[in-house]
Image: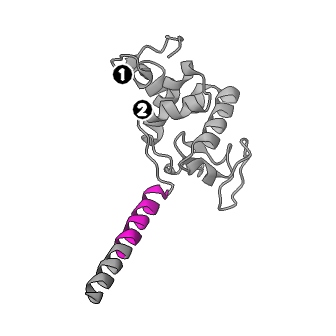
Amino acid sequence: MTNKVAFVKWSALLLGIQLLLLLLMAGASDGKRTFDRCSLAKAMDKLDVPRNQLARWVCIAEHGSHYRTYVIGPPNDDGSTDHGIFQINDRIWCQPSNGQFSYNGCNVNCDALRTDHIDIAMRCAQLIQQDKGWGAWSVFKPKCSGQLPSIKDCFGGKSNHLVGASMHGKF
């Protein structure tokens, strides 16, 4: 009987360790988050982004990075690259980790724009928008100056997932 008791205790210990490892892995982040339309809108809302801008930011993220926080875009004509969910340029707005020259207008390392937490990327994107306007994003004119993805259903309202660009209401 002693062997059976020891086996049960050992099995329970192993099961506990496995459960602990699963919980740790589930909580661990590899820095590769992909949002969807509503999860991004809600995350930006929690960061106090004006609701009348959320659909435009969602559109930029959808067409710029496919809602992925970890994206580094292909090289631009000038050799610079764009980073994170809002595809922020490393020649002008963030400091690349390779040490190449940057004006670093957001005073941030580009790596900080490619994390699961979008607060730094959002603040930098807002600074860019205030300084250069929505046209600072190459996807804006062809993709985000007309119909915008609706976010009403993300906050409990009904939606057909598109809203006119001229709408400046709460959503």
* Residue at 58%, 26% in the rendered image: 134
Tag 2–tag 1 contact (CB < 8 Å)? yes
Q: Residue furthest front?
A: 1
- Nearest the viewer among 105 and 168 is 168
Quadrant in which the N terminus appears: bottom left
Mark 2 vs mark 1, CA separation in Å: 10 Å
Asked if one can make out residue 56 in the rendered structure from this viewpoint, the answer is yes
The rendered magenta stretch, by its main secondary structure, is classed as: helix
Packing grade of label 1 (10 A; few <14, some 14-19, many >=20) is some
- Nearest the viewer among 67 and 22 is 22
User: Which colour style is shown?
Assistant: one colour
With respect to residue 136, does 72 lie above or below?
A: below
State which tag comes first along the sequence, 2 or 1: 2
Percent of width and height locating residue 28: 49, 59
* Residue at 58%, 27% in the rendered image: 135
What's drawn in magenta, residue-wise?
14-29
Count of numbered circles in the view: 2
Packing grade of label 2 (10 A; few <14, some 14-19, many >=20) is many
Q: Which mark is residue 161?
A: 1
Percent of width and height locating residue 119: 62, 40
**Residue to which mark 2 is pinned:** 37
Percent of width and height locating residue 52: 55, 18
| Direction from residue 132 to residue 134 in the image, left or right | left
- Callout 2 amino acid: Arg
Q: Which mark is residue 125?
A: none
With respect to residue 1, does 14 lie above or below?
A: above
